[in-house]
Image (spheres, rainbow, N blue to C red):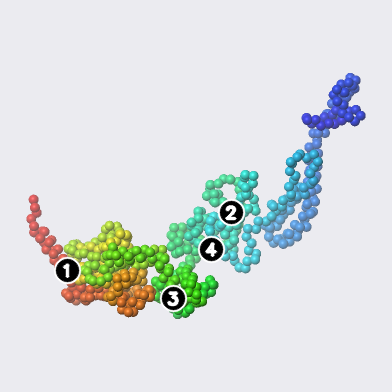
Amino acid sequence: MGLIRTPSGLALAPTSMGEVVSPEAFRQWPEETQAKMRADIAELEKELQEILKKAPQWERERRERMRGLNQEVVSHAVALFIEELGKDYDDLPEVMDYIEQVRADLQENAEEFHAPGPPQPGGLPGREERREPSFRRYQVNVIVDNGRRQGAPVVYEDLPTHGNVIGRIEQMARFGALTTDFSLIKPGALHAANGGFLLVDARKLFMQPIIWEEIKRALQSNEIRIQGLTEALGFANTVTLQPEPVPLDVKVVLLGDPMVYYLLSGSDPDFPELFKVAADFDEQVPRNHGNTARYARMIADTASREGLRTLSREATARVIERAARLAADSERLTLRLRAIDDVLYEADYWAGQEGRDEIGAGDVERAIDAQTRRADRVRERSQEQILRETLLIDTDGEAVGQVNGLSVLQLGEFAFGKPSRITARVRLGRGEVLDIEREVEMGGPLHSKGVLILSGFLGARFARRQPLALSASLVFEQSYGGVDGDSASSTELYALLSALSGLPIRQSLAVTGSVNQRGRVQAIGGVNEKIEGFFDICTARGLTGRQGVLIPSANVKHLMLRRDVVAAAARGDFHVYPVETIDQGIELLTGVAAGVADDQGNFPPDTVNGRAQATLLEFARNAREFAAGGRDQEPRP
């Protein structure tokens, strides 16, 4: 009797001389032999079934014994290495716990580290053999290593996205699916700066979604939780890794303009609690002997560091003058060093074009002129409109109630002065000064404030004993854009005094400066650009020696004029008049004394104030006569 394999499994079959008997040959046997053989086969099949039922259990027992043996062998094999590794980290309980977990996992999964055996005979064609053992899960993902760093880490994050600051969990595509593991956990800037300082540009920070809230959350909880942007926003519900929070001890430094600080302080209640130290750096330094010497050394250091040619003494002095001009103050030097560096780079280029080994003052001047020329297209068009008399600006002659005012236009980093004609008309009225710019909603609040101050000045000077029976209108002629600022308030007052007194104003002069209710002329901004704007128009038409600009005396210290303006003033071809009061200014503009009031408040009749007072008295008298005449008239039916 033999054991054979059939499509339905193992079976017993009769044999003869070691060969399985075919069914035809078996049927030729005697009946008794066949019956006995069938009975024996049935009995043996029962025993075979019992044996086959126990085979899986025997296989499991074999595997368990082999598993136990492998674990025992592996335990002995790694024990020495684990013990030696533990000596280096016995003072770190968390590391020791991890090492123990590695040992237990090695022992538990010992079969995975057997070398693949040779192909088994009879194996299915195309069947893959067992892959090489992998130790990937025992690798350590070191996300930050500051072991060689001396001192606390200082990290500047140029692109503060969510992943770059908090960290991220990357994914790999395998067989059409995205997979990940601990080795794909990537650090952020907070990890790199942990224990030290993280520097971030505030403007760039607020251009990224949600990262501001994540940084605040990390600082408040003193830990870093790595999660994806979609998880932080609550949009994702896919299963992914959840790394343990990392303890955080970091100082975050936000860099930005003062306006960003003020906005955060006023709008985010968490900001004052998290960012308690404010460092407000000035953009200017006093221009004294010590700072000038330091500035010169800084210029030399920059040239050396950037590989530029050395600067002559005259060139260094010219760069320092440029620094004062950028500060808009002759007694200050700018700390906006990028603009200074740009001048040095371009001056070095021009020196190279001339084949010189040293940068001269002429190279610096040429660089400054080139920067201006590249940015002054709008200024040229504005001046062209004036010279072609499209915009009406007089630079000679006289006119009543008409003054040349000066304003500044800022286009990016370039600013220039633009003359404007301001006119005033007066008539009998109720003591109001009409601002036409405000009435048509083209005047800003500061400009409107300046006009209202004029009413206060006129009332205090001329209406102490009689009502101010005046109605005046003021306007910027040919103004097609908004007007704001109070730097033209003194100009408007001069126009009013001229209109009231009937005295003409010299059109060869331009005026800038604000005024208070007491008639004092106050400082304004952009004084250099305003002077140069009127000077350019006068130069194009021809300097006569009578042209100039009236500025507040308080702005004298801010003068850092172009060299051509300074040269013209030195020759007497152009003038800059500092004035402290309206009376000083009106005397220059009209050539007539302003006049001083006596104890009764009356001004000499041949002065500007006397003439204006006479006009206002006549207005008041006419107003009383008109009011009396109106009461005497009988009402019409």
Gap between marks 4 and 3 measured at Cα:
40 Å
State the residue in front, 169 or 510. Answer: 510
User: From where the camera sits, is residue 442 visible?
Assistant: yes
In the rendered view, does 382 fall on the left or right side of 98? left
User: From where the camera sits, is residue 523 visible?
Assistant: no
State the residue in front, 101 or 574. Answer: 574
Q: Position of residue 604 (x, y in %)?
A: 17, 76
Packing grade of label 2 (10 A; few <14, some 14-19, many >=20) is some
Secondary structure under badge 1? helix
Secondary structure under badge 3? helix
Gap between marks 2 and 4 measured at Cα:
20 Å
Q: Position of residue 54 (x, y in %)?
A: 80, 35
Residue under circle 4? 199
Circle nearer the N terminus (2, 4): 2
Gap between marks 1 and 2 measured at Cα:
80 Å
Circle nearer the N terminus (4, 3): 4
Name the residue located 36 percent from the left edge and 75 percent from the top edge. Answer: 564
State the residue in front, 155 or 537. Answer: 537
State the residue in front, 519 or 57. Answer: 519
In the rendered view, does 460 fall on the left or right side of 329? left
Residue under circle 1? 615
Circle nearer the N terminus (1, 4): 4
Gap between marks 1 and 3 measured at Cα:
57 Å
Q: What label does residue 362 carry, if any?
A: 3
Secondary structure under badge 4? strand
Name the residue located 56 percent from the left edge and 63 percent from the top edge. Answer: 155
Image depth: mark 4 or mark 3 in front: 3
Q: Amino acid at mark 3?
A: Gly
Secondary structure under badge 2? strand
